[in-house]
Image: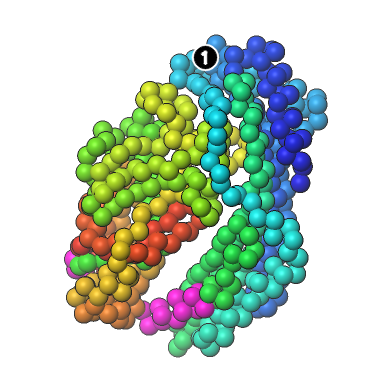
Amino acid sequence: MLSGTVMSDLARRMVAQATQKGAAMAEAYGLHSKELSIEVAQGAVETMKQAEDRGLGLRVFANGRMGYAFTSDLTEGALALTVEQALANATYTAADPYHALPVPVEKYPDVVTFDGSLDATAVEAKIALAKEMEAIAKATDKRIKITERSAYQDAQYHVSIVNSRGIDVAYRGSYCGAYLFLVAEENGESQTGFSFSYGRGFGDLQPQKVGREAAEHAVRMLGAKPLAAKRAPVVFDPRVMTQFLGVLAPTLTAEAVQKGKSMFAGQLTKTVASPLVTLIDDGRLPEGIASAPFDGEGVPTSRTVLMDQGVLQTYLYNSYTAAKDRTASTGNGVRGSFKGTPEVGTTNFFLDAGTLTPEALIGDVEDGIYVTEVMGMHTANPISGDFSVGAAGLCIEKGVLARPFRGAAIAGNLHELLMAIDGVGADLTFFGGKGAPTVRIREMAISG
């Protein structure tokens, strides 16, 4: 990879050129990343791809107007042209008094973001891991017939941020993951199963657990039948609850609130969820896949409690939205590439764990459902909170998981769902940058 020192030096030169040419403020964001992906099926490698991307994005502010341009060509002439383009682009945007760049801080949080084992591990070992997951799944149950995807992925990246107000920071990061999609078949019926593992380094992955879980999840759904319509308690698997958090996350940004696109607008200090609900965004979470010492603007990441025991405490901010609300950035100016400006987004976003085991949450239900899969979550309305999604899982009968079901639908409102949570498990599980434990909803409308 390109030396981080070289990328930071190029960023400094761009910022210096921009200010010399009239920018009141300037910021350069440099990113160099490389990714590897391997897919295996039937014990053989189907695809193996390696990609590398690098470039610099430049934000300039002149007369209250912002301009942006980026380049993946790091030659001197291309960098100079990018500076000219950013300044020219600023002439076409409207002046905005809330444009701002952050200033340096004395200390950034100490966050482990890089593991050198990815470079130290041979590609052959990574292929073997993907093959191992598939082999374990098939050995777990003879009804596992098809591997849709047994995959390994990893990435390494270097981030540099320099601005004209004195910020000059950089860090190196890595992550890897293994996931398995497969199909179980019996008597002409087929059902799918999924599991995954991820971490900073190769040694964090658990291929045996992934293979076993994916097989078990597929097999337990064989024989699934429709449900009769009813209102009943619903228990969400951690992955399903995390999908609901994915809909909630954008509504908790200051940007959505300021634009009138959040159901939480005007709700600060009010009770918006059950007392069992504490929602946190933690950009410095140990072992969090989205943890970093600073965000996409160079602001230190932080632990932000958005809801504390059901009471809405704050929103997520970047520098721009914080200036509009006359508050401080929460370190949530996120950017996934040098090709765009920082938006407001989550880092490690999760529903805090409770004290109950999943078995205890299920054991108190006389007649209900345990939902392991939902379909159509993208149709949920983040402004009104209304949703109606397909669901599959297992029936709960007298406190025990019973027959599988498919083809059901659950409908409701996100705000009402949060208020109706009456049990939160201790099994907080992360799926990338979002996580949740098992959660029980007092009652929901279920249709067949």
Camera-nearest residue between 390 and 247: 247
**How many numbered circles does the render carry?**
1
Q: Is residue 21 left or right of residue 402?
A: right
Q: Quadrant of residue 241 in the image? A: bottom left
Q: Position of residue 76 (x, y in %)?
A: 80, 26
> How many C-alpha atoms fall within 10 Å of the one at disc 1: few (<14), some, or many (≥20)?
some
Q: Is residue 137 left or right of residue 318?
A: right
**Residue 391 is at least partly visible in this image:** no
Above/below status of 78 relative to 217? above
**Residue 94 is at least partly visible in this image:** yes
Above/below status of 311 relative to 186? above
Q: Position of residue 20 (x, y in %)?
A: 70, 13
* Residue 219 is covered by the magenta coloring: yes
What amino acid is labelled 1 in the image? Gly
Q: Position of residue 85 (x, y in %)?
A: 68, 21
Q: Which residues are magenta?
A: 212-231
Q: Which residue is mark 1?
A: 64
Q: Position of residue 264 (x, y in %)?
A: 29, 39
Q: Residue at x 50, y 69 (%)?
A: 195
Camera-nearest residue between 240 and 161: 161
Camera-nearest residue between 293 and 383: 293
Q: Residue at x 42, y 23 (%)?
A: 323
